[in-house]
Amino acid sequence: LEKADSGKISFCGSDLPKNNKHIRGLICLVSDLLHLDDHLTVTDTLNFLLTAYSIKKERKLATLEYLLEKTGLQKNRDSQIQYLSAGFRQRLRLAASFLPHFKLFLFDEPFKDLDIWMKKKTIHHIQELANQGKSIILATHFLDDLKSVAHRLAIIQNGRFEDIVDLKAEA
């Protein structure tokens, strides 16, 4: 990223870059570009995630079970990542988005490789986040996926904003 030469950015009452660490803790990124260690199990990966997000020790087991249930990975808890299908890997990447402390969610192709059941569940989850007042930025090539979760659509081509469409006005 380039350094700003003017202006000010605030998020949740904190100024950037002064409070970067605090602000990073409020942002959840879900992307298929996030690397998962193939030799770790689903449980190991989720425990790493819980530690990274400073989930208290006494809450870890309950939170782990909650994430397994929300992602439908209970039966795969002891499976190594290398043996999971692409869709189950994507479910694992989505796990962080079920943690309650985030204020901003950046979803990059969240529906990629998901089966229809998990895709519907993820759409419902994103709708619930929006209903809770969370901020969501979702990038996808599949515009039909956006109709049920987005209020506005920004068309970006070659790195430039081409148009912003109000989806609720068109409904």
Image (cartoon, grey):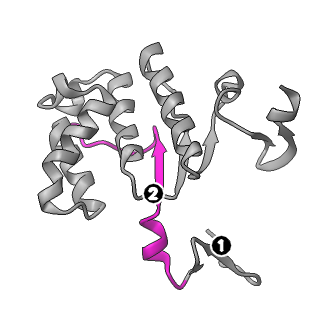
Percent position (x, y) of residue 17? 56, 81
What residue sits 58% from the left and 43% below the top?
A: 131
| Secondary element type, mark 2 | loop
Which is more toward the observer, 114 or 171?
A: 171
- Identify the residue position indicated by label 1 in the image: 2
Q: Quadrant of the N terminus?
A: bottom right
User: Vertical placement of 114 versus 39: above or below?
Assistant: above
Q: Would residue 31 be found to the left or right of residue 96 on screen?
A: right
Which is more toward the observer, 88 or 159?
A: 88
Residue type at the position of mark 1: Glu
Percent position (x, y) of residue 108? 55, 41
**Residue 5 falls within the magenta-colored stretch:** no
Image-quadrant location for residue 153: top right
Circle on res. 151? none
Query: Badge 2 local density, few (<14 within 10 Å), some, or many (20+)?
Result: some
| Secondary element type, mark 1 | loop
Residue type at the position of mark 2: Phe
Label 2 vs 1, first from the N-terminus:
1
**Residue 22 falls within the magenta-colored stretch:** yes
Q: Would residue 146 be found to the left or right of residue 17 on screen?
A: right
Q: CA–CA distance between discs 2 and 1? A: 25 Å
Image-quadrant location for residue 115: top left
What residue sits 15% from the left and 44% below the top?
A: 44
* Span highlighted in magenta in the image: 18-39
- Identify the residue position indicated by label 2 in the image: 102
User: Vertical placement of 71 versus 102: above or below?
Assistant: above
